[in-house]
Image (cartoon, rainbow, N blue to C red):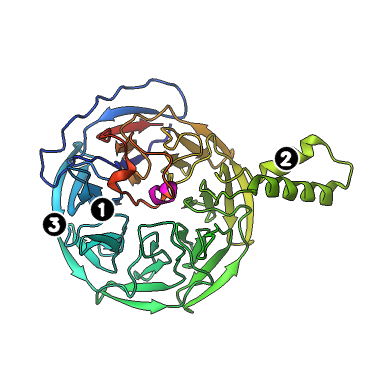
Amino acid sequence: MALGIVLLTGVSMFYATDEVGQADIDRPSIERTTTKTAGVWQSTTRMVLARYGHTATLLPNGKVLVAGGFGGPGGGGLLAVSELYDPAHPKWSKAGAMVLPRQAHKAVLLADGNVLVAGGLAADSNNLSATPSAEVYSPTRGVWNRVGNMATGRLGHTMTVLKDGRVLVTGGHRADDVMDDDAFASAELFNPTDGQWAVTASMSIGRRGHTATLLPNGKVLVVGGRMAGSNGDATAMAELFDPVKDTWVAVAPMRNARYGHSATLLRSGKVLVVGGEDVKKAGDDTKRLDAAMAEVVKEKGSDFTSTDLAIALAKDPGPYRSLAEIYDPVTNQWSPAGNLNAARSGARAVLLPNGNVLVARGADDESLDLNSSEIYDVKTGVWRLTAPMNDGVGIGATLTVLPGGEVLAAGGDRGYVKSKPGLRERLAQGIYRADDFNDNSALSSAEILRY
C-alpha cells in the first residue's frame, strides 16, 4: 500500500493568540476512527496556534511553514506569527512573524528555497482591504523581509511559479465583500532576482476564485472562476498563458462552469478539476431541465426515455459540482473523471505520492461544512471515501504533501452561520470574519490519514 504525507492545516478559532501557550483554551478531544475505507484518520499533535485563511508551504528541509490567517480573542484578528511543522518528530514550533498580518493571501516556494507571500486581506485604517504587499521568508535565517508591492491589491487570486523561476499572479478582486461585482483580468510577474513586480498581459476575462496550473510545457492553464458584473456568474472558460510570448490564448471550456474548485496536475500531464459551484439564481432549475431536454431531443429525437433525460441532467448537477473533469493539453479536450461521493465547494486537493488525488473537506448546499475526504484512483477513475475526518479540521484548511508516508490534517471549526449572504464564497477563498461564526467551537487539533 503506497503512502504519502499531506498536511491539512486548520481553519478557525476565535481565541487563538500570537503568543505561544495561549492556544489551548477549550479544546475538545479527538476520537479515533477505525473505519476500513480508502484511509483512516487518527489524532496527532496540535498546532501552536489555531488559524484560518492561512497558507502552508513545504520547505526543502521537509518542514512545513504555516503563515498568517485570522484568529485571536474577542472575535479574532489578523495573525502575523508563522509556525513550522516538523514531521520527523512530529511537532509544531513558533517561527518568525510576517511584516504584515494578513489572511486569504497566497504563498509559493521559490527556486532558491525561500517562500513568497503576496496579497490577501490586511488592516488599513482599521478596515480590511486587499493589499498589494508581498514579503519573503528565509528558512535558513527564520525571518521575513518585504519585497516590492504588486501593482494591484488583490485576494481570490492565484500564484504560480514558472519554469524560469518567476511567479505569475492572476485575477482576484479588491474587497472582502464577495457580493461586490469586481473581478480582475490583470496579471503580474514577480522576479525573485530583484524582488520586483511587472504587469504582464491580461486574461481575456476577469476572474476570482479560479485556478492556475503550471503545465509540463511551461504554460499556465487558468480555469473557471467567478466573473465581474452584477450577476457575478461562474465561468467554464479556460485559457493558457505563454510566459515566453507573454500572451493568453483561449482553450476548450469545461463542461460545467464553476468557482471554488481545485485543479491538480497529474503525472500524465493532464489536469484534474474537482468540485466548486456555480451561482444559484431563481429559475436555474427550470433552465437546467430545459437545457437537458434540448440536448436529449437533439441526440435522440422525440423518441427518448426518462433514463436519457436523467443522464443529460446528471451532466449539470446544479450549483454544487460533484462531476470531476480532466483536461488534456495535447488534444485540448475535457473528459469526465467520475463523480465525487459528495458535491463540494472550497475543498482542497493534492497529488499523492502514488499518483492518486486526495480531496478533503469543503461545503455543500445541505450541510455547510463537510467532514469527509476522498481519493481519486487515476487508473480506475473511481472516487473512494476515506473514513470520516474528525471535527478538528474545517473548510478552508490547507493540504500539503510531505516527504514521508501519511496524511496530516490540523485545525478546524464547527461554528459557521449558514444563512449569511456570500458566506460560502468567502470561505471558499479563505476569507473569514468574526461574525461568520455562532460560537467558539473552533479547534487547532491535528490528525493523520493512513491510506
> Which of pointers 3 and 2 lies earlier in the amino acid sequence?
3
Q: Nearer the viewer, mark 3 or mark 2?
A: 2
Identify residue type, mark 3.
Gly
Furthest toward the top, the residue is 34
Q: Is residue 13 left or right of residue 406?
A: left
Which mark identifies residue 440? none
Residue name at image x 30 percent, y 49 percent: 433
Which mark identifies residue 311? 2
Q: Are marks 2 and 1 in contact (CB under 8 Å)?
A: no
Query: Which type of secondary structure does the marked residue at label 3 adopt?
Result: loop
Identify residue type, mark 2.
Ile
Where does the magenta region start and end? 423-427
Q: Quadrant of the N terminus?
A: top left
445 to 435, vertically: above or below:
above
The chief SS type of the magenta part is: helix
Residue name at image x 32 percent, y 22 percent: 32
Q: Nearer the viewer, mark 3 or mark 1?
A: 3
Query: Which type of secondary structure does the marked residue at label 2 adopt?
Result: helix
Is residue 115 among the parts visible in the rendering? no
